[in-house]
Image (cartoon, rainbow, N blue to C red):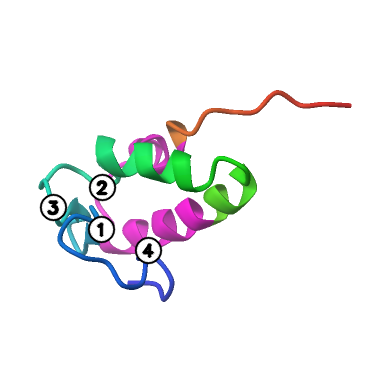
Amino acid sequence: MTPGATASGSGPEEHAPVPPDWTCGSCGDEWPCATKRSRLLSEYRADRAALSVYLGSCLAAAAHDLRTAPTASLQDRFIGWVPRSPRTS
């Protein structure tokens, strides 16, 4: 797994990823699970760019581990759910 792809200090209720299958260590769903998505949106609510960088690093690590998974499905799973902020000019 790529360094920095998982949060440090993760506990049993952290909903951290478990490579190489990239399942949630708490609920067993595909990571990021619904609980983790909600927590990430809350944690990064003021900095969507940082959230995108974090999830991009997770996507890169998962793509390495899940080599046979379709790229589009991994992109949807890891970053496709992040709401886009309206652009301001």
Q: Amino acid at mark 2?
A: Trp
Q: Residue furthest right?
A: 89
Residue 58 x/y as whole percent: 40, 58
Which of the two labelled residues, at mark 3 and mark 1, occupies the earlier sequence position?
Answer: 1
Residue 77 x/y as whole percent: 34, 38
Q: Which residues are magenta?
A: 54-79
Residue denoted by label 2? 31
Residue denoted by label 3? 26
Q: Is residue 59 left or right of residue 14?
A: right
Q: Say which of 82 and 45 sits in front.
A: 45
**Residue 33: mark:** none
Query: How far is the residue under mark 3 from the one under mark 1?
Result: 7 Å
Could you tell me which residue is drawn at 15 percent across and 42 percent down?
A: 29
Q: Are marks 4 and 3 in contact (CB under 8 Å)?
A: no
Q: Say which of 53 and 63 sits in front.
A: 53
SS category of the residue bearing label 2: loop
